Structure formats: C-alpha cells, structure tokens
Amino acid sequence: MVFKYANKRTGKKGEELACNYLKKSGYKILSRNFLIRGGEIDIIARDGDILVFVEVKARYSHEYGLPKESITPWKIKALKKSALFYIQKINWGNNPYRFDLVGIDYAFSKDSPDIELIKNITF
C-alpha cells in the first residue's frame, strides 16, 4: 500500500511539473487525468491547432530504464482508446491530433529533475 501511494505522489508531482513545462512551451492545458474504463490520459492540451494527448513518466532511478522507455504496448493501446473516446466526445472530427511524452527524470537531482518533451511519439 505504501508503494502504491508513493507512485501516485510521484506521478502527481511529475504531472504538475509537466503541465508547467508545457505551458512555458506554449501549450494550453485543457484537461488532466482524463479517465475512461480501461485507460487514462495524463494531460490533454492544445499546441496551436493540434490536440495533444500527453503521457507523463517520472522516474527516481534508472533501475528499470529511462522515463521514455517505460511505455508498454498495453499503455499504448489504452492511450489510443482513451484519445479516440475524447475525440468523439468533443466532436474533434478529422482535425489533427498527436501523442507527446514528457519524461521527468529525478535520478541525478531530486530538486531539479531533467524534463524531456518528445513530440509526436509514434507507436
């Protein structure tokens, strides 16, 4: 139970940092923690005219790889499903959208983590 709570706290802190980073990069945050059965999107934003679904991965060590290496096939499937549901919900139609990844790496500094934005991650 303690481990699960620590992961949630790490995720929430990482998402907050990611939102601030995205805002400074010109993104407009539309929604956070969009949840449907079988999937969740950490951040939904606009980058100009493009709807962006952002996955945030935070790591305190590299024991299990870098943040950007932690997206599993199951997570990709869940992201796509959730994104398509959101697109229908807001009647986005055939307008452009993409998936971005924000990696928050605390391995070298707990106070000043490295933040990496990868635009248009492909599956």
Image (cartoon, grey):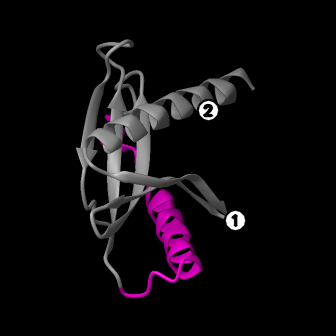
Point out the stretch of residues depicted in magenta.
66-94
Q: Amino acid at mark 2?
A: Lys
Q: CA distance from mark 1 to mark 2?
A: 19 Å
Residue 70's x, y, as percent?
A: 39, 44
Q: Quadrant of residue 51?
A: bottom left
Residue 87's x, y, as percent?
A: 50, 77
From this view, report whether residue 41 is shown above or below residue 64: below
Q: Residue at x 51, y 61 (%)?
A: 74
Residue 35's x, y, as percent?
A: 64, 58
**Secondary element at tag 2:** helix
**Callout 1: few (<14), some (14-19), or many (20+) C-alpha neighbours within 10 Å?**
few
* Nearer to me, 1 or 106: 106
Quadrant location of the N terminus in the rendered image: top right
Magenta-colored segment: predominant secondary structure: helix
Q: Earlier in the sequence, mark 1 or mark 2?
A: 2
Q: Residue at x 61, y 32 (%)?
A: 8
- Residue 8: assigned label: 2
**Secondary element at tag 1:** loop
Q: Residue farthest to the bottom?
A: 94
- Residue 37: assigned label: 1
